[in-house]
Amino acid sequence: MLKNKIQCLIVDDEPLGRDLIATHLKELKQFEVVAKCSNAIEASQFLSEHHVDLMFLDIEMPVLKGTDFYQSLSQKPQVIFTTAHRNYALDGFELEAVDYLLKPITFARFFKAIERFLSFREQDHIAPNKTAKEYIFVRSNRKEIKINLSEILYIQGLKDYIQIHMKTTSYTVKKSLSSIIENLSDDFIRVHRSYIINQIHMSAYTKHDIEIGEIEIPIGETYFTSLKKTFK
């Protein structure tokens, strides 16, 4: 296996479902199928011994549903759910799935899900060499506005925009979370695909959320383990 490839696990109780995903992935040189499992038990055993970057997980499987299996994992790879049942979409997105593919899966729809995965992967990459900064300038209402970093409580991503929340005001800026975090100090950490917080204003946290005063910011399941190490 080449280390520079994105390693994929396919979990589906139907052989045709597994083979279709594998066939689609063969068209993408950056991706490699490291295993194909027919149920959650096999997948659990494989994940206990191997690293996986992306899992394609069928929802409706015997013994243990894909969503229940994914929720039970302590270390969660990124996941794209696959199913023949449209009514599971909400369950998938509540678990912060990259995407939800409805069978039969066309390559065009599959490729769109892959682009979402690559976009999230890029956003989750935090620049390692941040310098100590005290302020940034952001463009809002046709002005370049100076914002002191110490005054920012948290930043929320809203599709093509972000909202910078402060104690008494907020600014809406056409920018992505991944681009803004590169300009912030080390006090700022990503806790969810849609949220960056300023640690200096954090008052408490649980497995599910972070408190900044009376504000509760959700913690993404894939972020919690690394966050615990940061907060120690």
Image: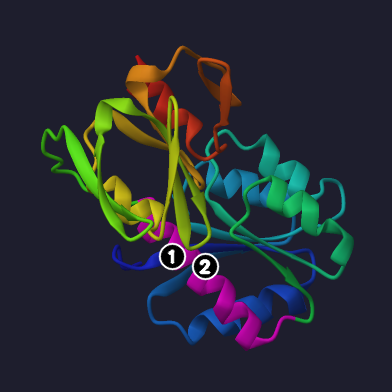
Asked if residue 94 lies left or right of residue 125, the reply is: right
Q: Residue 30's image quarter?
A: bottom left
Identity, as a three-letter code, of the amino acid under mark 2: Arg
Please tell me whether residue 217 belongs to the stretch shown in magenta: no
Asked if residue 91 lies left or right of residue 24, the reply is: right
- Please report the residue visible at 55 percent of the width from the left and 43 percent of the height from the top: 76
Q: Which residue is mark 1?
A: 119
Asked if residue 48 lies left or right of residue 17, the reply is: left
Quadrant occupied by the N terminus: bottom left
Identity, as a three-letter code, of the amino acid under mark 1: Ser
SS at circle 2 = helix
- Residue 120 image position (x, y, % from top left): 45, 58
For label 2, the crowd category at 10 Å Cα-Cα, with few meaning under 14, some 14 to 19 and many 20 or more, is some
Region rendered in magenta: 105-124
- Residue 46 image position (x, y, % from top left): 56, 49
Residue at the front extreme, as displayed: 142
SS at circle 1 = helix
Quadrant occupied by the C terminus: top left
Please tell me whether residue 108 belongs to the stretch shown in magenta: yes
- Please report the residue visible at 61 percent of the width from the left and 26 percent of the height from the top: 208
Above/below status of 106 relative to 126: below
Q: Which residue is mark 2?
A: 116
Q: Are dots 2 and 1 in contact, CB under 8 Å?
A: yes
Asked if residue 150 lies left or right of residue 31, the reply is: left
- Residue 149 image position (x, y, % from top left): 26, 32
